[in-house]
Amino acid sequence: MHFDNIYDIVKNEIYAGDRLLQKYFVEDSLTHKKIENRGQLLKYYYQDTHPAIIDRATWEAAQKETARRQAEFWRPRHPFSRLIKCGICGKSYCHKAGKRSRAKWGCLDKEKATGSCKNFNVMDSELLKACNNVLGLEEFDEAIFKDKVKKIIVQPEGILEFHFHDGEIKREKFITDKVELRRQVVPIALYQGIEICCGIHGHRLWHALINGRHYWKCGLKVQHKVDCDCWSHITGTKVLQMVKKLTSRDDITYENLAEVVEKSIVMPDNTIEFHFKDGRIEKCPKP
Ligand SMILES: [Zn+2]
Ligand SMILES: [Zn+2]
């Protein structure tokens, strides 16, 4: 007899002084190959057949605990777990919980420090929409989904490829979270009258309010998807911090920023050039 792991030791009744007979049986009398008795034959349980090395109360408590842990391990998972695969690297997609509408699925490879996969995230809302479309459902039904769908492959061109158990494949377009992010972005000219532009191409920076935080991003990136070398992702807190420092005023907020600052230019050397309403021009390094 050999033990594969601690589980086998804990489950072994011999330590409690009992014997369970016919756990294994010889299926084929020619090969003498032993197989596990999974109910094909009767099993015989005898108590106190020999001195125990573990008292019965401890043994029974251990049985209860292993049963509890097993139940926990096999608890029902998210219906999409392990079913979504990356169309670039082949790894599974894992769920990233987020605030309300921000919950999404992303390639497992991206989660690692060494990961290099660039495949898109899929928002929960888009995934459900696509599922309902391919299954012809009004509302998501886990039983129908599990019954029909074998796997979903996220293709990098923004397509969810549904592979059905019967071999059928259906493709559904989805909106990536990047597009969703872009939707929340408005040109800076529309925001509080504050103008921030890129010091390389002169593009206006675009403003976004995400989860209550202000960001500015180079217009070249947002509009034309061209990478710009300017310091293109600026948080509102940093801009406020810089203006407060340059003006020695603590009362600067997003609301009154435009009263003080005429425009600002984001320079590629990680500084912002502020043009104040009073004519002053000052550069401030990234805090
Ligand atoms: Zn991947
Ligand atoms: Zn730029």
Image (cartoon, helix red, strand yellow):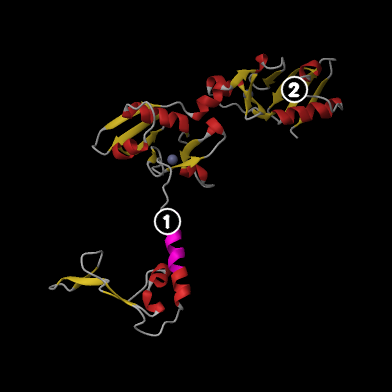
Write down the residue under mark 1. 71
Beta carbon of the mark 2 residue lies under 8 A of ligand 2: no
Of the residues shown, which amino acid type is indicated by label 1? Answer: Ala
Question: Is any atom of residue 132 visible in this view?
Answer: yes
Q: Which residue is painted at 52% across and 28% down in the image?
A: 178
- How many marks the image carries: the answer is 2
Image position of 105 with respect to 126: above or below? below
- Local SS, label 1: helix
In whole angstroms, how far apart are the C-alphas of marks 1 and 2? 53 Å
Estimate the x, y position of residue 139 in percent, counting from the top left. 39, 29
Residue at the outermost left position = 30
Residue at the outermost bottom position = 51
Q: Which residues are magenta?
A: 62-72
Image position of 74 with respect to 11: above or below? above
Of the residues shown, which amino acid type is indicated by label 2? Answer: Tyr
Question: Is any atom of residue 203 visible in this view?
Answer: no
Instruction: Check residue 104 for magenta coloring.
Output: no
Q: Is residue 48 left or right of residue 103?
A: left
Seen from the viewer's position, the closer of residues 194 and 225 is: 194
Mark 2 Cα shell of 10 Å, populated few (<14), some (14-19), many (≥20): some
Q: Which residue is painted at 39% across and 39% down in the image?
A: 84
The C terminus lies in quadrant: top right
Q: Is residue 242 left or right of residue 158?
A: right
Mark 1 Cα shell of 10 Å, populated few (<14), some (14-19), many (≥20): few
Q: Which residue is painted at 83% across and 29% down in the image?
A: 245
Q: Which residue is painted at 51% across and 47% down in the image?
A: 112
Residue at the outermost right position = 248
In which quarter of the view is residue 257 placed?
Answer: top right
Q: Quick check: which quadrant has ligand 1? A: top left
Q: Is residue 201 left or right of residue 103?
A: right
